[in-house]
Image (cartoon, rainbow, N blue to C red):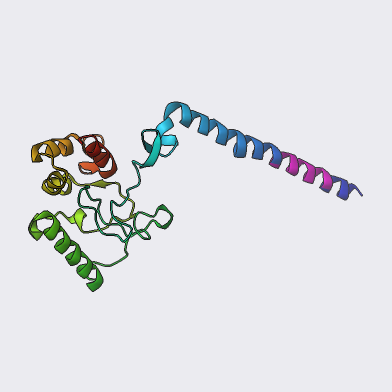
Amino acid sequence: MRFLTRSFRQAGVAVRAMCVLTIALGIGYTLLITGIGQLALPAEANGSLVTVDGKTIGSSLIGQSFTTAKGAALPQWFQSRPSAAGAGYDAGSSSGSNYGPNSKALVALISARQSAIENTDGVTRAQIPADAVTASGSGLDPDISPAYALLQVDRVARLRGLSISTVKKLVESKIQGRELGYLGEPTVNVLELNIALTQLG
């Protein structure tokens, strides 16, 4: 009898401890951190959403394709780097292609992408930067290199009836430097660049 009483008492203590810790850590801590995030960094806490005229059109942290429903590039827009995530920039299927450097499929894919850029932008393969023809490891990279953005200037300017110098200045104004001045490489966020492009007319 004493053994049962002791067992019930220990079980009661364990249940109460579990309830207290669940409320304190599972609910209280979560609400505290969420509140701090909303107060200190509201945009980042909500997914770094990008809105235009009150309508959310994407996130500055997740890339998107500027293509037709069939996947053909819309040449009047700056193009993102290729994506191997699902059908392209699918946040639910984040991944790279998993092709090795000696993969014939990868070589063929890169060659096809190079040919497409040669045709649309009137450049040689030697001028095409690597990020223009290869997917990132996540498949969600929202940025391209300044070299790839500048390579597209002539095409975008021509199709939009804008001067090359105007579009070039726009690209240069959107170049983001290295993190902390030395980490990574300079980048251009494609979504933000294309939004700014629409404001030029």
Residue 52 on image: x %, y %: 35, 35
Q: How many marks?
A: 0
Q: Is residue 79 left or right of residue 24?
A: left
Residue 107 sits above or below residue 126 on the image: below
Q: Farthest residue in the right direction?
A: 1
Residue 33 on image: x %, y %: 51, 33
Q: Is residue 124 left or right of residue 93?
A: left
Residue 90 sits above or below residue 106 on the image: above
For the point 44% across and 35% down, the residue is 45
Residue 125 sits above or below residue 158 on the image: below
Residue 27 on image: x %, y %: 61, 37
Let me know if residue 81 is in the magenta part: no
Q: Specify the principal SS of the magenta part.
A: helix
Residue 112 on image: x %, y %: 19, 66
- Closer to us: 17 or 121: 121
Q: Is residue 120 left or right of residue 12?
A: left
For the point 47% across and 30% down, the residue is 38
Q: Farthest residue in the bottom direction?
A: 104
- Closer to us: 164 or 48: 164
Let me know if residue 16 is in the magenta part: yes
Res 27 seen here: yes
Quarter of the figure that contains the C terminus: top left
Dividing the picture into quadrants, the one containing residue 181 is top left
For the point 13% across and 44% down, the residue is 157
Residues shaded magenta: 8-18
Q: Farthest residue in the top direction?
A: 39
For the point 11% across and 47% down, the residue is 154
Res 48 seen here: no
